[in-house]
Amino acid sequence: MLVLKQQGFAARLHVETASLCRQEALSPEDTVILDLDLPNGQAAGLVDRMEREQTPCRLIVLAGVTSRAARARLGTAGPMAVLTKPFAASDLLALLGTPLH
């Protein structure tokens, strides 16, 4: 998060998905960076919820597994990028400036 703030991004940390869900509505300009390894399947649950509610924001998933395995765990989630851990801060910053497919 420090890297994001140093680059001028308005970053907020949520240690559990419930706190993010209580936030105000997300917009297309927002990006959710989500760690797939959150306990109790929280990450997959949040992705499902975002898909059901057609949340318009961008999604970047951080995963300790390959991109293909992460996408398999997340099911049919819409546009997202997957960064496999460990990754360089420059990789994350590059995704924030790139449209997701």
Image: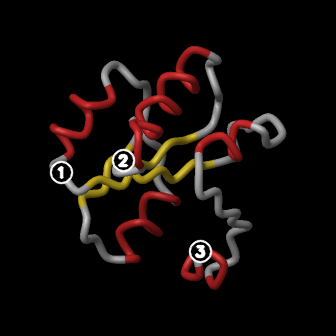
Q: Is residue 96 above or below residue 40?
A: below
Picture coordinates of residue 1, whole percent (x, y): 57, 74
In the picture of the structure, the residue carrying the numbered disc 2 is: 36
Q: Which mark is residue 54?
A: none
User: In which image quadrant can residue 6 be found?
Assistant: bottom right
What residue do we see at 15% from left, 49% from top? Answer: 66
Picture coordinates of residue 75, whole percent (x, y): 31, 22
What residue do we see at 37% from left, 45% from top? Answer: 81
Amino acid type, label 3: Leu
In the foreground, 51 or 81: 51
Q: Are marks 2 and 3 in contact (CB under 8 Å)?
A: no
User: In which image quadrant can residue 17 be found?
Assistant: top right
Picture coordinates of residue 96, whole percent (x, y): 51, 59
Amino acid type, label 2: Leu
Residue at disc 1, secondary structure: loop
In the picture of the structure, the residue carrying the numbered disc 3 is: 4
